[in-house]
Image (cartoon, rainbow, N blue to C red):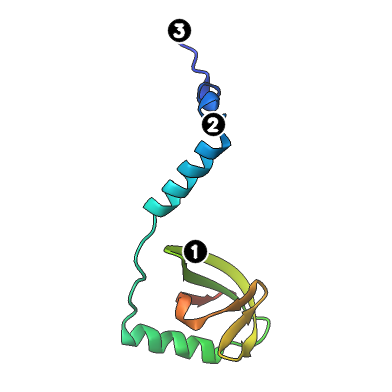
C-alpha cells in the first residue's frame, strides 16, 4: 500500500523565499486579462442602479483592477467627487464591471 506524504514532499522546493516570490509574481502575471469592454446598455443599467442606491445599502461589486477581476461585498455610503464611497473605501466608476444590490 502506498502512503502519500501530501504537501510535505513539496516543502523543500519552497525553502528559498526569492524563488517563492518569483513564482508568485509569475503566476499573477500569467493570470492577467485585458479590461472587458461594457456595452452601452450595460453602462446605462449600471448608472440606473447607482442612481437608485440609498445610503447603507449592501451591494456586491465586480471590479477590474490591475489585470484581475475581483468581487467585493460592501456597504454603499454615497458619492463624492465622482467616486463611489463604500465601507471598503472609495471606488472609481470606471473600474466597476457589475453591481448588484443585496437584500
Give the image location of residue 20, x and y in percent.
52, 39
Please name the residue shown 34% across and 66% down the image. 34
Q: Residues within 10 Å of mark 2 (few under 14, many from 20)?
A: few
Q: Quadrant of residue 17?
A: top right
Left or right of 97? Residue 59 is right
* Residue at which label 1 appears: 70
- Mark 2 or mark 1, whichever is nearer to me: 2
Q: Quadrant of the C terminus?
A: bottom right
Give SS at disc 3.
loop
Q: Quadrant of the N terminus?
A: top left
Give SS at disc 2.
helix
C-alpha distance separating marks 2 and 1: 27 Å
- Mark 1 or mark 3, whichever is nearer to me: 1
Front position in the image: 24 or 48: 24
- Against 46, residue 71 (above or below) is above
Residue 7 visible at all: no
- Against 67, residue 89 (above or below) is below
N-terminal-most mark, 1 or 3: 3
Front position in the image: 11 or 59: 11
C-alpha distance separating marks 2 and 3: 28 Å
N-terminal-most mark, 2 or 3: 3
Please name the residue shown 52% across and 23% down the image. 6
- Against 48, residue 37 (above or below) is above
Farthest-out residue, top: 1
C-alpha distance separating marks 1 and 3: 43 Å
* Residue at which label 2 appears: 14
Give the image location of residue 11, x and y in percent.
55, 26
N-terminal-most mark, 2 or 1: 2
Kindly identify which numbered label has been placed on residue 1.
3
- Mark 2 or mark 3, whichever is nearer to me: 2
Please name the residue shown 45% across and 81% down the image. 94
Residue 16 visible at all: yes
Amino acid at each position: 500500500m502506498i502512503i502519500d506524504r501530501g504537501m510535505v514532499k513539496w516543502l523543500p522546493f519552497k525553502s528559498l523565499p526569492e524563488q517563492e516570490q518569483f513564482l508568485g509574481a509569475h503566476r499573477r502575471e500569467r493570470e492577467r486579462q485585458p479590461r472587458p469592454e461594457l456595452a452601452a446598455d450595460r453602462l446605462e443599467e449600471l448608472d440606473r442602479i447607482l442612481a437608485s442606491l440609498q445610503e447603507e445599502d449592501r451591494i456586491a461589486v465586480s471590479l477590474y483592477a490591475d489585470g484581475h477581476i475581483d468581487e467585493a461585498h460592501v456597504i454603499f455610503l454615497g458619492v463624492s467627487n465622482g467616486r463611489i464611497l463604500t465601507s471598503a473605501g472609495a471606488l472609481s466608476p470606471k473600474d466597476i464591471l457589475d453591481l448588484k444590490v443585496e437584500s
